[in-house]
Amino acid sequence: MRVVIISLLVFFVAVNGEGEQCIPRYFGHSSFACVCNATYCDTFSRPRVPAEGTFLLYTSDMNINRFLETSHDFTDIIKNGTEEVNEFTLDPEVTYQNVLGFGGAFTDSAAKNWLSLSPSTRDHLLRSYFSSIGIEYNIGRVNMGGCDFSWRTYSYDDVEGDVALEYFALQEEDTVYKIPMIQRAKELSEKPIRLIASPWSAPIWMKSNDQFQGMGHLLEEMYQPWAEYFVRFFKSYQEHDIDFWGVTAQNEPINGNVPFFWFNCMGWTADTQRDWIAGHLGPTLESNNLGDLKLMIMDDQRYLLPDWPVTVLNDTEAAQYVDGIAVHWYWDDFSSPNLLTRTHELFPDAFLLGTEACVGDKPYEVEVAIGSWERLERYANDIITDLNHWVSGWTDWNLALDTGGGPNWANNFVDSPIIVNETADEFYKNPMFYAMGHFSKFVQEGAQRIELTPISATSLNTVALRNPDNSIVIVILNKTEREIEARIQTPQEGSIIVVVGPRSLQTVYYV
Ligand SMILES: *[C@@H]1O[C@H](CO)[C@@H](O)[C@H](O)[C@H]1NC(C)=O
Ligand SMILES: *[C@@H]1O[C@H](CO)[C@@H](O)[C@H](O)[C@H]1NC(C)=O
Ligand SMILES: *[C@@H]1O[C@H](CO)[C@@H](O)[C@H](O)[C@H]1NC(C)=O
Ligand SMILES: *[C@@H]1O[C@H](CO)[C@@H](O)[C@H](O)[C@H]1NC(C)=O
């Protein structure tokens, strides 16, 4: 009996410092989700400063752990208990891009799911993402008007021919749903939240096809009213004390060039986006005192690189207004990450930022797979790859969806790191949530990627960063079923020797 009690104590102390533990539940997939309700939710405290000569290691794996914290000494003694050894050298003096951050999207549907919970469960959800006992997201994307993750189609001015935007008005989706959610997130967060707005479609009377979905583009005579609409949006949110950090010119501009495309979209080519930014959006945003709003182009798949930015940024009129290039992840399996590096080399002053990603979107995938470990691996792998190819941050899609992956008026259901069960007043934190946290909790805004070089072939996916406070973060993903020993030689502290368990994700942290 005593033995049992002691081992339980050890277990609880070992897992994630002083925080509340994950309450695991299986839903028939490869791993478990952590259950939160009105009175309970697992937490993740900030890493303490590791003692001199030691580093902290945080481990999540398929079978047992979420953010398990352990402490280890830097050493030069080779353990060699494992069969497979992968060696690396770390060079913090070789630096790459600056990090902007990590986050998710305050969509209409995310806000509706959030609001369907009781007030204390709601706070557990937002604390999990934004607070100092959560994974500390600092980016939030917001749909400007309706998107597919809305329960109806709408814009902020559905009065035909209202080019003066006299009837422009935020809708219930903003005032009742998203704005309260954003405001509460801001209250619970210690960091500023960088909000990014993205439109899916203009009002249908501004478009060639008179519909929110399907193939169609903005009518040329509407180029200026559509730019003014952006300004009205930002001013309306300012009235609710919400300022935006950035804006993308259009969500997935390619979709609106596809016949019968099935959810909200509006078609642009790189040429029309360039001309609209140069002649209308750029000057209109600039002359309306919206602060240092970051304008991003593309907001679409990686395979469009580098041609899309080349077309827009080779034009000095357009380029003067553009700060960054936004990328989505949906076809990353079919396009090389070297496209990101080439784009960076062509336009070193424009940041690259991941603005949307989710799983369960393909027809051959299950929409919602609560507890899927493979989905954590896909997130972590893509984030590591992006960071290793000049991308400054990574933004997930819906912050929360229901158990069917919605609501979505166009039946485009997908998965989310947090699945809400309204009936039970519970939510489930998927492995994907922890994938995000292995980066967002440790990598601060302004961190720089630093050089981590494998000395021989490796089966591990790795990335290293240095924070503005000089702490070092190394993320290691092992997708294999094998145990691998990672030996990372640092310039001063000695070696970091970590046994990377099968199917695990780890973060090394030291100061
Ligand atoms: C909430 O979760 C905790 C921990 O699992 C559990 O003890 C408690 O009974 C739950 N509360 C409700 C209302 O389900
Ligand atoms: C570690 O052990 C493996 C096999 O157990 C062996 O092949 C390898 O040479 C050893 N490496 C070192 C550095 O001792
Ligand atoms: C960029 O612009 C220059 C001059 O305006 C032009 O000569 C060149 O062909 C353009 N390059 C691309 C890739 O469009
Ligand atoms: C949601 O909660 C209800 C009520 O507790 C339960 O019957 C249902 O199975 C839950 N759904 C999921 C996906 O767990």
Image (tube, rainbow, N blue to C red):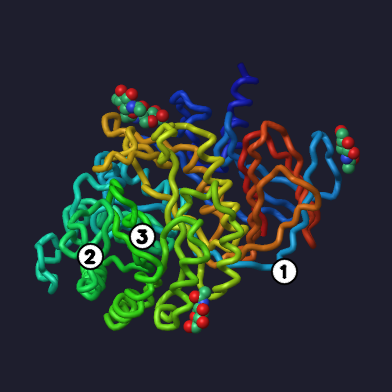
Kind of residue at disc 1: Glu
For the residue pair 221 and 479, the one nearer the viewer reads as 221
Give the secondary structure at mark 3.
Answer: loop
Residue 451 spot, x, y in % from top left: 70, 62
Residue 480 placement, left or right of 79: left
Q: Which residue is mark 2?
A: 240
Q: Which residue is mark 1?
A: 93
Query: Relative to 329, is 466 above or below?
Result: below
Of the image marks 3 and 2, the number of the one nearer the N terminus = 2
Q: Which residue is mark 3?
A: 253
Residue 116 spot, x, y in % from top left: 25, 40
Q: Residue at x 57, y 68 (%)?
A: 344
Label 2 – label 1 distance at C-alpha: 44 Å
For the view shown, which residue lies furthest in the top direction? 1
* Contact flag, marks 1 and 3 (Cβ < 8 Å): no
For the view shown, which residue lies furthest in the front direction? 259
Q: Residue at x 67, y 59 (%)?
A: 511
Q: Residue at x 37, y 44 (%)?
A: 125
Residue 349 placement, left or right of 246: right
